[in-house]
Image (spheres, grey):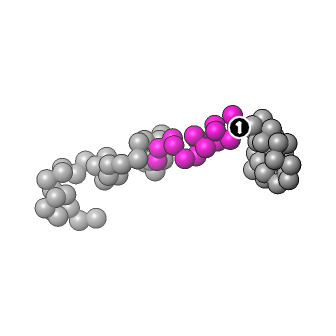
Amino acid sequence: MGLIKSVHEADCISNLKERSRELKILGDEIEGRNQTILYSGVANQALPLNRDIGGRWFDEIGWAPADLERGAVEV
């Protein structure tokens, strides 16, 4: 069974103690999935790796910051 389906089923349990217990069982897997999807950075389209969010993609293709600042680069 997929994680999303498992979490949904656990989240729909009306008994709060049982719901909490079932979600706690899934907790490590939920946290791992969230880490992978939400916090691993931004996938670079040119290189097969993730990088921290921030910065500018065009910095990676070699334009000098001064050229970018004065608008000397045509995209």
x 80%, y 38%: residue: 21
Question: Could you tell me the amino acid type at mark 1?
Answer: Gly
| 10 magenta-colored | no
Q: Quadrant of residue 67?
A: bottom left
Q: Residues within 10 Å of mark 1 (few under 14, many from 20)?
A: few
Q: Position of residue 73 (x, y in %)?
A: 20, 61
Query: Along the line of sight, which residue is nearer the eye, 34 or 70?
Result: 34
Q: Residue 38: give x, y in percent of width and height.
A: 55, 47
Residue 41 on the magenta span: yes
The kind of secondary structure element at disc 1 is: helix
Magenta residues span 27-42
Residue drawn at the location 58% of the way across and 46% of the way down: 37
Q: Closest to the observer: 25 or 56?
A: 25
Q: x, y (%) of residue 20? A: 78, 42
Residue picked out by circle 1: 27
The quadrant of the image that shows the N terminus is: top right
Q: Residue at coordinates 48% horizontally, 40% vertically from top-left? A: 49
Q: Is 59 on the left or on the right of 38, as rendered?
A: left
- Location of residue 75 in the rendering, given as x and y in whole percent from the top left corner: 28, 64
Q: Quadrant of residue 70?
A: bottom left
